[in-house]
Amino acid sequence: MDRATVFGEVAETYDRMRPRYPDAMYDDLIAETGVKVGSPVLEIGCGTGIATAELGRRGLHVDAIDPDPRMLRLARERVTGLDVRFVEQSFEDYNSGAESFSLVFAAGSWHWVDAQTGLPKAASLLNQTGSLAVCWNLPRPETLPRPSGFDAAYRKFAPKLADVASQVKNRTQEHRRQAITASNLFKEPVSFSYPWTKTLSSADYTDLLSTHSDHRMLGMQTLAALLKAVRDEIDQNGGTIELAYETVLYVAHKLT
């Protein structure tokens, strides 16, 4: 099973539950890159079009690529009337012909791009004043209390994910920012950060977990058992859980 394409199995749930990006991020993106109405943008791994629609609403001409037709079906429904066209393809296989872009953008997808070829290809697709921008919604659960039974549930049903669930691993994307600089293809990235929180019911939280690629790779029976244990634990502790996130945006201008 290809971990990068498991999202299409739950495209509707993904579209409903994946957190959006704050309006301030799009405002800063446009201000920092200098893109204007009609500027050509290439979006990598657009998924169900969550960010695509926001770019389109701001008057940008967006070419959005994604290899999964199940995700693109929902994306097409979201951008009706906007200046967006879709390409069912991976970024690695994408060929723009003679077209170049003012912005290459990846919302929560840059980590799926091949590390050796991604940065050179992005640079080659940009015009002389173009920019690469990548963003993620990163969970910060270590900042909030959570049910104590979570650790036991993960140790029982998904021990390989137990350290992730306990937030032992570093969930930042700082190493990707450093890789952009080290490529010598872009100027030092400009960083933006937007902290925020959201409260979910037990059902919504486990629906969200079901869209995470590492969880989907567990297999349906194991995943169902894990999600039931997590849902029961939340229900026994008030029925809701507060999540803390940080939206991180890196904008890197192409070196000429």
Image (cartoon, rainbow, N blue to C red):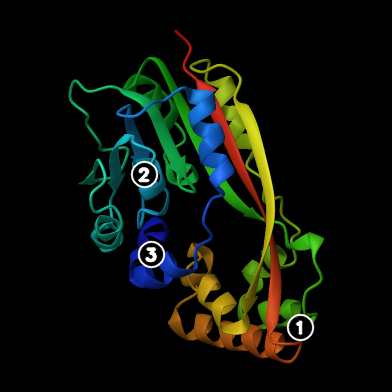
Q: State how far apart marks 3 and 1 are (Cα).
A: 27 Å
Depth check, front residue: 107 or 62: 62
* Residue 172 coordinates in the image, percent (x, y): 67, 46
Query: Which mark, residue 6?
Result: 3
Depth check, front residue: 142 or 194: 194
Q: Which residue is mark 2?
A: 57
Q: Is residue 185 visible?
A: yes
Which quadrant of the rendered structure holds the N terminus?
Answer: bottom left
Q: Residue extending furthest top?
A: 256
Depth check, front residue: 22 or 218: 22
Disc 2 marks a residue whose amino acid type is Arg
Query: Which mark, residue 149?
Result: 1
Image quadrant where residue 11 sits: bottom left
Residue at x 77% of width, y 74% of height: 146
Q: State how far apart marks 2 and 1 are (Cα).
A: 43 Å
Disc 3 marks a residue whose amino acid type is Val
Which quadrant of the rendered structure holds the C terminus?
Answer: top left
Few, some or many C-alpha atoms within 10 Å of disc 1 (few <14, some 14-19, many ≥20)? Answer: some
Q: Is residue 44 visible?
A: no
Where 68 falls versus 86 (above or below)? below
Q: For this view, does 48 lie left or right of residue 205?
A: left
Few, some or many C-alpha atoms within 10 Å of disc 2 (few <14, some 14-19, many ≥20)? Answer: some
**Secondary structure at numbered mark 3:** helix
Few, some or many C-alpha atoms within 10 Å of disc 3 (few <14, some 14-19, many ≥20)? Answer: some
Q: For this view, does 131 lie left or right of residue 88?
A: right
**Secondary structure at numbered mark 1:** helix
Q: For this view, does 62 lie left or right of residue 119?
A: left
* Residue 191 coordinates in the image, percent (x, y): 64, 31
Where 185 falls versus 119 (above or below)? above
* Contact, mark 2 vs mark 1 (Cβ under 8 Å): no
Residue at x 40% of width, y 56% of height: 4
**Considering only order in the chain, which callout, 1 or 3, is on the residue closer to the N terminus?**
3
